[in-house]
Image: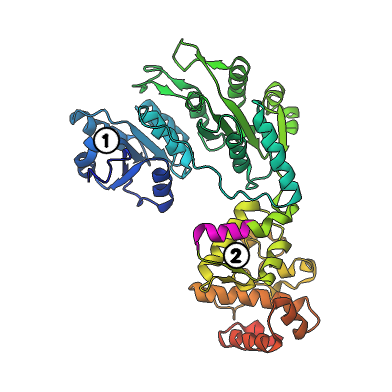
Amino acid sequence: MKSQHSTNPLALWLDPEAALSPEHSQALQVSGWAVMPVNTLDNLLAHAAEAAMVVLHLTADVTRLKAVQQLLQDAGLSTPVVCRVDRQELDLAVEATQAGALTVLAAQDVRQASWLRLHNQLNPTATRLSPQPVRNVVFVDPASQHLLALAQKVAQADVTALLVGPTGSGKEVLARVLHESSGRAQGPFVALNCAAMPENLIEDMLFGHEKGAFTGAHREQKGLFEQAQGGTLFLDEIGEMPMHLQSKLLRVLQERQLTRLGGQTIIQLNVRIVAATNKDLKKAIVEREFREDLYYRIATFRMRLLPLAERPGDIIPLAMQCLLQHDKKPWQLLPQAQAQLLQYPWPGNVRELENVMRRAMVLCADHVVTPAHLMFDDWLTASAMAAAPALPVSNIVSTQPEMSEMTSPMPRAMPEEMPQATDLNSAARMNEHQVIMATLANTPSKTEAAKVLGISPRTLRYKLAQLREHGLGMASAAC
């Protein structure tokens, strides 16, 4: 066991409700932690002497936290405890902080930056880690190339930057480009999602606190500003920051110094601020939801990221990057599948594209992605986009009815003869049926439909017969 954790500090992961997820495990390991799941207090005690921190999931109250603290105290250990709390449990998060938790993270938080911050905070004598640099960043579309060139120029000047764009468009990726193209590239890149943290904790997260600053503050804690010294602090969703914190943030940005909660010592700052938002901050200013003076302080350089649908040149390279990122074997994206990707409006932007490609990887067994492997969040397929208003609802069947109910202006249709998908093969057949029927509805003949689908008329007839055999009754009507 000792040799396993000789390089990286050990985090004991106690979560009786759920197993350690692969996403959390990867985030901790990439951030410099060795992680060991433990299921009971006895297991925790057996390895507590080796651990640099305990990660504890809280649900109803802080009873579990107090039990762990007492266990460590009885063993003569001062191992810090990090609590994971569901986002909606704001009162519990505050109670955990007051009860002595080193910090509180959202239970759903799988960002490397969160665990990296703890690594640098709890292991000050170790080599300071920085997040992995952005590799193979896709800026192919002319609009994206222009934005990249602008970002690289802005990076050379030590000014604040405001990134504006819809959710999932890649604002954090661009923030990392700004960091890695600047003279601060060797310093830390620290990120905070202002919308993900409980309002009561954001101030403590940003500015830190001194020992004894409030009940349960058993040790001093550096805030994110201090942890980002010499590097970049990325404030995502800054439009969600509470008004009373906006004034404190403004003062820190103006004076380039801060005082921790409960402290008197003035700490000089050497940090670059990059902020991001998907909100219209000018409108928020008019509605008195955002301070105008703070806006002009963070928006020295304002850069806008376009929605994915408005930079089509990035779509296919991003799709291929996603395929190769998760499987290094050669992948082929057929022209018909590429056409569907280019026609789809991508309301969820790059994040949605990544989801679609991950689904395709699950459904595709031979590393050749066809239209049948593309399952979009929206119930309208790419081949039906142009004629969507004229399509009968009965000709298109969603493989994700919950999403279609939210996004479709028309009622969803699930004919009685349509079997529900019970495994990956049936899901793929249903999606293939969806593509074929939409194509038949929008072409004058089966010959033309086969051409659009990239298959021969004979293959189309064979597929229709196959679908009919599997009980997809609408296919028989098309025959």
Quick check: 378 above or below 278?
below
Residue 68: which disc? Answer: 1
Residue at 64 percent across and 25 percent down: it is 158
Q: Amino acid at mark 1?
A: Val
Residue at 21 percent across and 39 percent down: it is 45
Quick check: 263 above or below 339?
above
Range covered by the magenta-colored residues: 318-328
* Residue at numbered disc 2: 401
How far across and how far down the image is residue 25, in percent?
39, 48
Q: Secondary structure at mark 2?
A: helix
Circle 1 crowding by C-alpha within 10 Å: few under 14, some 14–19, many from 20: some
Q: Nearer the viewer, residue 245 or 276?
A: 276
How far across and how far down the image is residue 403, in percent?
61, 60
How far across and how far down the image is residue 389, in percent?
79, 66
Residue 414 visible to the viewer? no
373 in the magenta segment: no
- The image quarter containing residue 221 is top left
How far across and how far down the image is residue 475, in percent?
66, 84
